[in-house]
Amino acid sequence: MRDISSTIGNSVVLSNVTSWRGLGINFYLSWYQAQKLFLSGTPTSTVQTFLQPFDWLSKLSGVYRSENKPMVQLEQRPVALVTGGAQGIGLGIAEHLLTIGWRVAIADLNEATGHAAQEKLAKFQDALIFVRCDVSQESEVAHYVQAAMEQFGQVHSLINNAGIANPYSGPVEELSLADWNRWIGTNLTGCFLMAKHAVPHLRPTRGAIVNISSVRAFQSEPHSEAYGASKGGVVGLTHALAVSLGPAIRVNCISPGWIDTSAYKHPPQQTNLNPIDHEQHPVGRVGKVQDIAEMVAFLLSDRAGFITGQTFTVDGGMSRRMIYEE
Ligand SMILES: NC(=O)c1ccc[n+]([C@@H]2O[C@H](COP(=O)([O-])OP(=O)(O)OC[C@H]3O[C@@H](n4cnc5c(N)ncnc54)[C@H](O)[C@@H]3O)[C@@H](O)[C@H]2O)c1
């Protein structure tokens, strides 16, 4: 396998460097200098020495088990399974994990968007595979996990993100059993099937699972019974798995609020948000895909080593607002 530690490996450090430029230090020069070193064919060891002073920055942002060695060889990097990773939040999670040095196996029902995701992430091609998979079908889940093992040899994390994201299933008297089962099958049974088939590979690596639920596990609008039930089930599945699988595997859950995924569609779309959409949130804005991706990366990292069985709401404070009509 080609050694890409001098390209992707160093971007592990540099991407974190750029994200900490708010500290008032001008890191653009460092990026420029490092690129010049790569382009001039400077040996990797020299470049690594050059970058050592920035190692503390990568520690701050939680690079997975690479505290003393951020620039690891491709085959030594941790591996994540990201379901529903072809677009939206899942694609953002996959992109973020690749950027901080993971290898990623994306699964998605939609083959066309899966290939579009591969194109978008082409610079990480040595660290990425896409497998078409319907997470509600056990044989397809087994095939996906097997494909990831064949490609990467091990698995360190599972992010259960695939879902029917539309919460509206219509009036309950008109909701067919087939439609109810569709929501439950993808959003809840899919998480169970993925855990079932990934756990044998996560035990030896002492890995972690992150399930993506929703604030709709706890709050509702009318006509969202199937979605709400499926996402509530994900919260329960999370703490049950955490108790069953500890101490080898930690299992946590994120409940996103309103996340604008328009930039992570194929092709990327313009956001269509009004000022009121942002202003109603206590933090003053609608959520970004990156907000969820950062939380996933933290929960997978050793910094979250004392956290399991928990559900974290990431909604800009929206669910803490008390709303009574005047
Ligand atoms: N966007 C939000 O505001 C928001 C809020 C709360 C929770 N969520 C949850 O986050 C997750 C991602 O949502 P999103 O907004 O990015 O949605 P999205 O529709 O943009 O992406 C979902 C992805 O899952 C895939 N998928 C659907 N069914 C599948 C199946 N059976 N097997 C494999 N892949 C399947 C889709 O093809 C798609 O690529 C979902 O679980 C959703 O319920 C989203």
Image: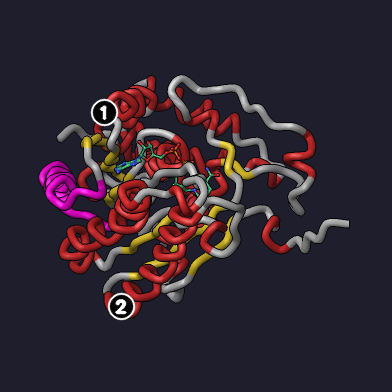
Q: What secondary structure characterizes most of the magenta part?
A: helix
| Secondary element at image label 1 | helix
Question: Where is the C terminus found, in terms of image quarters?
Answer: bottom right
Question: Where is the N terminus found, in terms of image quarters?
Answer: top left
Question: Circle 1: is it few (<14), some (14-19), or many (20+) Cα within 10 Å?
Answer: some
Residue 12 visible in the shown view: no
Q: Label 1: which residue?
A: 111
User: Measured from the top left, where is residue 23 in percent x and y?
Assistant: 69, 47
**Magenta-highlighted residues:** 135-159
Q: Amino acid at mark 2?
A: Gly
Image point 37% across, 52% down: which residue? 180
Q: Which mark is residue 287?
A: none
User: Measured from the top left, where is residue 26 in percent x and y?
Assistant: 66, 36
Pick the residue in front: 164 or 49.
164
Establish if 205 lies above or below 164.
below
Instruction: Judge left or right: residue 85 versus residue 170.
Output: left
Q: Label 2: which residue?
A: 246
User: Measured from the top left, where is residue 108 in percent x and y?
Assistant: 29, 38
